[in-house]
Image (cartoon, rainbow, N blue to C red):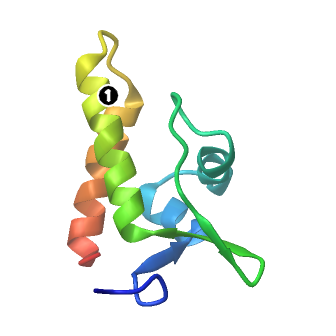
Amino acid sequence: MPTLIDSPKLPLTNAARKLGLHVATLYRWTSTGCKGRVLPSLTIGGRKYVLVADLERWLEDGREHEEHSRVPSRFHKRADDAGAELDRLGC
């Protein structure tokens, strides 16, 4: 079983770049959350990281939430784009 150290992780700046978001958006998601959900993160040597598995799960949960909501949002499209990009990168 992989340990936390072995788990693939991305600095928030890299994750934001790959998702096409501003890094402040990801910092906000890790501190105050979005639509009642906080993105799990860890701090190593003063830098914030997100585990790739946590990011994928968080985005998938966001997709499911949006599918049940009556008002479509940009989050749904960005979550789909982010998932495709992570797949393309082999993460």
- Disc 1 is placed on an element classified as helix
Left or right placement of residue 67 versus residue 35 in this view:
left
Question: Residue extending furthest right?
Answer: 46
User: How far across and how far down the image is residue 20, in percent?
Assistant: 47, 54
Q: Give whichever of 1, 33 is nearer the camera.
A: 1
41 to 88, vertically: above or below: above
55 to 80, vertically: above or below: below
16 to 78, vertically: above or below: below
Q: Residue at horizontal 35%, vertical 47%?
A: 59
User: How far across and how far down the image is residue 77, in percent?
Assistant: 30, 37
Left or right placement of residue 39 versus residue 72 in this view:
right
Question: Residue extending furthest front?
Answer: 1
User: How far across and how far down the image is residue 25, in percent?
Assistant: 62, 46
* Residue under numbered circle 1: 65
Left or right placement of residue 59 versus residue 16 in this view:
left
* Residue 45 location, quadrant: bottom right
Q: Residue at horizontal 40%, vertical 82%?
A: 7
* Residue 32 location, quadrant: top right
- What's the residue type where badge 1 is placed? His
Q: Residue at horizontal 23%, vertical 78%?
A: 90
Q: Give whichever of 10, 88 is nearer the camera.
A: 10
User: How far across and how far down the image is residue 68, in percent?
Assistant: 25, 19
Left or right placement of residue 5 versus residue 88 in this view:
right
Quarter of the image with the N terminus in it: bottom left
Question: Residue extending furthest bottom?
Answer: 6
Quarter of the image with the C terminus in it: bottom left
